[in-house]
Image (tube, rainbow, N blue to C red):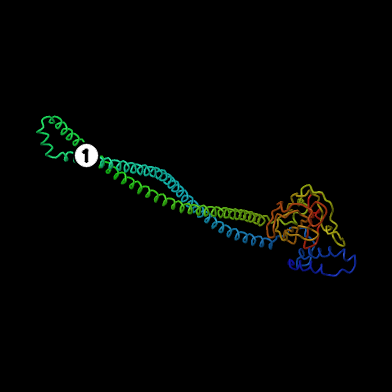
Amino acid sequence: MCSYRLVIRSMRRAERTPRRTAAQAMMRPAAAISCVLCCLLLPSTPAQSAPESTREPVADRTSVESAGNDIEAEMEASAQQLGEIEGRLTRLQQELSDRERQRDALYQELERNERDIAALARAGRQLTAMVDEQQRNVTDLEARLVETGEDLAVARNDLAELLRSAYAMGRGDRLRMLLNREDLTRSGRVFGYYRCLGRARAEHINEVEHLAAELARLGTEARNEARRLQRLAERQTETRLRLEAVQVERNAIVADLDANIAAGRGELVTLNANAQALRTLIDRLRRQVQIAAEIGINQEAIAARKGRLAWPISEARLASRFRGGEGDQDLHADGVLIEADEGSEVRAVHHGRVVYADWLRGFGLLLVIDHGDGYMTLYGHNQTLLKEVGEWIATGEVIALTGTSGGSGTRGLYFALRYQGKPLDPEHWCRGRG
């Protein structure tokens, strides 16, 4: 079979050849397409007539087995890669679980710290109020101590004045008062008055001194308590500031963990997607292995099914019939056009392997299946192709959806059958008539 590089080279050579006549110019696209299809479909051996009897496809069986081995090797490699991805997924999920547990523990610690900070803030506020109260008490005690000192000074001055007055009377005056019987009673009353007044002054001085000492003691205690409360408030402030600093660090760690967890989850999504893609690939390869095994077991050649093949579209209605293609400028003369709604399913008429699946001028999206023994089927003007080159296809498997690609102007499917490059009439091979 000619290589695809030769096909492309032939197409480009045909497009570069100068146009000589109008008739030749009209026939040139058909000639280019015919060249492409010939390079694509003609084998290196000369064409022979289609055999009517079934032959044992030894070469096809060998190629099927080789392809099955290749698919199994690819499936094994994909399964190994899937195992590695699943192992990485397991490790990543474990790491994410550990990070989430660490984050939850940090959140709990942050909650405790915030509660402690709140309690310290309330206690600090209360301590500040208590310190202010103690300061007011100290100020009040100091003011009272000043007043008591003034009272004490006044009492001492009064006592001193009383003592000076008593002393001023002198002993002589006291003897003179004793000799003067008329003033004896009055003198006794005066001396009694001095004694009572002096005793009262002394008691008042003692009370004032005791009050002053008590006020001084209370003032000292109040100042000590105020200093103690102040130190306690300062320590609580330091503790609160430390907790707030720790809070900032923990918040940074939590933010970093959240970012790592988010990144890990993104990677987890990517790995899951990759794993799912590999599972899909493995399933597809497994189906291909099954198809290849089925083809290897069921080696009924397409020639043995002549007249019994199903049409690629159920309840097919032919828009144009087979005309042999020789000397006909219609690109579809070597096949048939099957009318169908756009998007209808196209099924393979026989098992085989896809050898071409791409856009081709004049035929749009074209898919070619090699059925072995030199037989091929062509499906053109598709809306989309569901199979790729190298895939094994089972009989009746959906391979494309019909459309109008390639500028056919007709909604439907171009279907052709070849034996060693020679066009065959599909109506002779497919059961019933469209």
Left or right: where 404 falls relative to 72? right
In front of the other: 336 or 241: 241
Q: Secondary structure at mark 1?
A: helix
Q: For residue 130, which quarter of the picture? A: top left
Is residue 377 among the parts visible in the rendering? no
Q: Residue furthest left?
A: 179
Question: Which amino acid type is shown beneath numbered disc 1?
Answer: Asn
In x, y percent, where is residue 300?
A: 71, 55
Q: Quadrant of the N terminus?
A: bottom right
Left or right: where 88 falls relative to 39? left
Q: Which residue is mark 1?
A: 206
In x, y percent, where is residue 77?
A: 58, 60
In front of the other: 46 or 13: 13
* Label 1 environment density (alpha carbons within 10 Å; few <14, some 14–19, many ≥20): some
Q: For residue 370, which quarter of the picture? A: bottom right
In x, y percent, where is residue 68?
A: 63, 59
In x, y percent, where is residue 149?
A: 27, 42
Q: Residue furthest right?
A: 22
Considering only vertical position in the picture, is 11 above or below 322? below
Instruction: State how many labels appear.
Output: 1
Left or right: where 399 falls relative to 30? left
Is residue 424 among the parts visible in the rendering? yes
